[in-house]
Structures are given as C-alpha cells and as structure tokens.
Image (cartoon, rainbow, N blue to C red):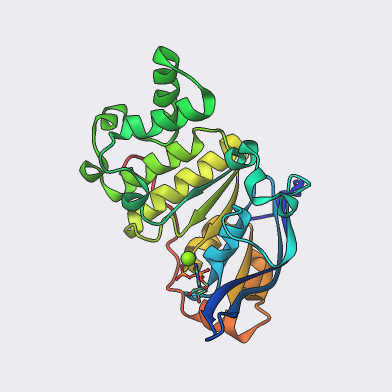
Amino acid sequence: MTDTGNEVILRVEDLRVRYEKSRSIWGTPRYSEVVKGVSFDIRRGETFGLVGESGSGKSTISKAILRQIPVIGGTISFEGERITDWKEKNIPLSYRRAVQVVFQSPRLSLNTRMLARDTVAEAVSFHLGLRGAELGRQVDMLFDDVGLPRYLGDRYPDELSGGQQQRVAIARALACDPRMLICDEAVSALDVSTQAQVIALLRRLQQERGLSYLFISHDLGVVRNLCHSVGVLQHGKFTDIGSVSDVFERPANQYTRDLLDAIPRLPGRMAPIGAV
Ligand SMILES: Nc1ncnc2c1ncn2[C@@H]1O[C@H](COP(=O)(O)OP(=O)(O)OP(=O)(O)O)[C@@H](O)[C@H]1O
Ligand SMILES: [Mg+2]
C-alpha cells in the first residue's frame, strides 16, 4: 500500500513506559522498562502496523496512547495536541471519543447479557444523546456500515459467530464517530476466511470514513495486506520501522528477517465483504 501523504494525526516520540516489577524489603519499588524510546507517526486515513513477539510491548504502547497507564518519558501528540501533558483526571471526553479500541476477544469485551442491538444503542445514546426513533435509525445505520444484518441485533453475543461479535464491537466503537481505531489483535482469534472479511471491512471503513488505524498483530501476512507503514518491536524497541514495502522488502535487522522468513505464503486475494 502506498502512503497517502496525508497529515500526521498521531505522533509518538521517544515513548518510555515502565511497570513496577517488585518491591524491596524496604518497600522501594523496582521497575522494569517495557517501552524504551519508541517513535512513530500515523497519518490520517492510514494504518500503522505494530508487530513483534509476545511481551514486546505492543499493548503497552496502545494503553499509553489511550492514557490508561502513566508514561515516564517522551510525548504523544494527537492532532497536534500533546496528550501526554494532560493530567490523568483531565482527559477530555472528546479525546476518548476520537480514539477507540477494538480488542482480540469480542466475547470478553461485549456484555454477554446485552442484546447486540442494545450494546450499540447504549454507545450511541451515551455519545450522541439520541433517543427513540432517531437512536434506532442510527443503530440500523451502524449495523449496515459493518455489514451486520439487522435481525442479528436481537441476539446475545453467545448467539453470534466470532466474526459477527467482532462486527458488533466495531459498530460500538464507531458509535462516537472516532478518527482513530486501535485494533489490538482484533482479527487474531478469527479463522482465516473470517479474518479476511473483517480486514476487508476495516479497509472499507477506512476509505469511507478516513479512519486511521493502529493495527497490532502477530501476523505479518495480515500487516502486509492492510498497513501502510509498520514498526517491528522487540523488547520495547523498534528493530525496523518504515513503509511496509521498505520493511518487508529490505529489512535492516536480523530479527525482522527471521520474522519475515516465518510468514506463510500470502493468499492472492481477499475474501468478499459479508456477514460471517
Ligand atoms: N500491568 C502490568 N504490570 C506489570 N507488567 C506488565 C503489565 N502489563 C504488561 N506487563 C509486562 O510488560 C511487557 C509488555 O507487555 P505487553 O502486554 O505490552 O506485550 P504485548 O507485546 O502486547 O504482548 P502480546 O502479544 O502477548 O499481547 C510484558 O513483559 C508484560 O509481562
Ligand atoms: Mg498485547
């Protein structure tokens, strides 16, 4: 995929995050730094892929962007505003709306006792304040947008397939009209054909809405298919970062080359969009 040349929407500069590992017998905390000076940009309407082995710090970076964990160094800016300057208690709702997240397991992120329709309606009514027929119309529109037949709204998550559950989670994330989606292994739990359909959906939503994605994945094949640029993370640092074509065709680092050698051959074409 070629770069769009659009403006930078998210800039991460020299980000450092640590977690408390243990305490000494005197109660002094010992830390382990898991993100060690990471920098990257995401442009509007583009997808940045974050890949790397388990424990390399991918989700930690996403949590820092969502301001769910403190950062010890570096800065994160969204649409030119330095969000790492905000105090924890003063994160504006407008930012919470602008950046939404979709996780690996929709089964865990959805309320199992809530009908699919109500899950989406709750988000729409909270963020947009809609009620009654207007709310119903907006929910229908979101179901249509994510390729989910409306009758599935009367089902609980357990009565939906994994792909359908993920579409409900995406519809809920879109309820507040975000500008960026963080997809943390959002297609990893799906079988290959369902995965291809959800990826096709993400690509269509990106084109229609100009969305930017931070796409976290173990699967380099998927990243190559969907992303414009990519960062390969190992022990909290990038071993390679750049456009997908640069990193995949001319990896600078042996770790990246080893990861690339492990990719199975890519399918030639994506499955069609549809409810799965
Ligand atoms: N809340 C926490 N407290 C302490 N350590 C943590 C915490 N969350 C994550 N870690 C540690 O930080 C490191 C990075 O974790 P992170 O979840 O960011 O990895 P990841 O790249 O997302 O892995 P995976 O691919 O398995 O999801 C790991 O060593 C992990 O054990
Ligand atoms: Mg993770």
Residue displayed at 26% across by 28% down: 151
Marker count (numbered): 0
Q: Residue furthest front?
A: 26
User: Which of the 4 image quarters holds residue 32?
Assistant: bottom right
Q: Is residue 55 above or below residue 62?
A: below
Whether residue 56 sits left or right of residue 164 in the image: it is right
Residue 240: horizontal and vertical position, in percent? 66, 75
The image position of residue 89, as x and y in percent, is 63, 46
Point out the residue furthest to the top here: 133
Front in this rendered view, residue 252 or 43: 43
The answer to whether residue 59 is seen in the rendering is yes
Q: Is residue 96 left or right of residue 77?
A: left
Which quarter of the figure has residue 34? Answer: bottom right
Is 231 displayed left or right of 7 in the figure?
left
Residue 86, percent from left and from top: 72, 49
Depth check, front residue: 238 or 250: 238
Residue 143 visible in the displayed image: no
**Taking 171 as reference, is 214 above or below it?**
below
Residue at 55% x, 80% y is: 27
Q: x%, y% of residue 93?
A: 61, 37
Residue at the (45%, 60%) spot, across then down: 185
Q: Would residue 244 be found to the left or right of residue 197 on screen? A: right
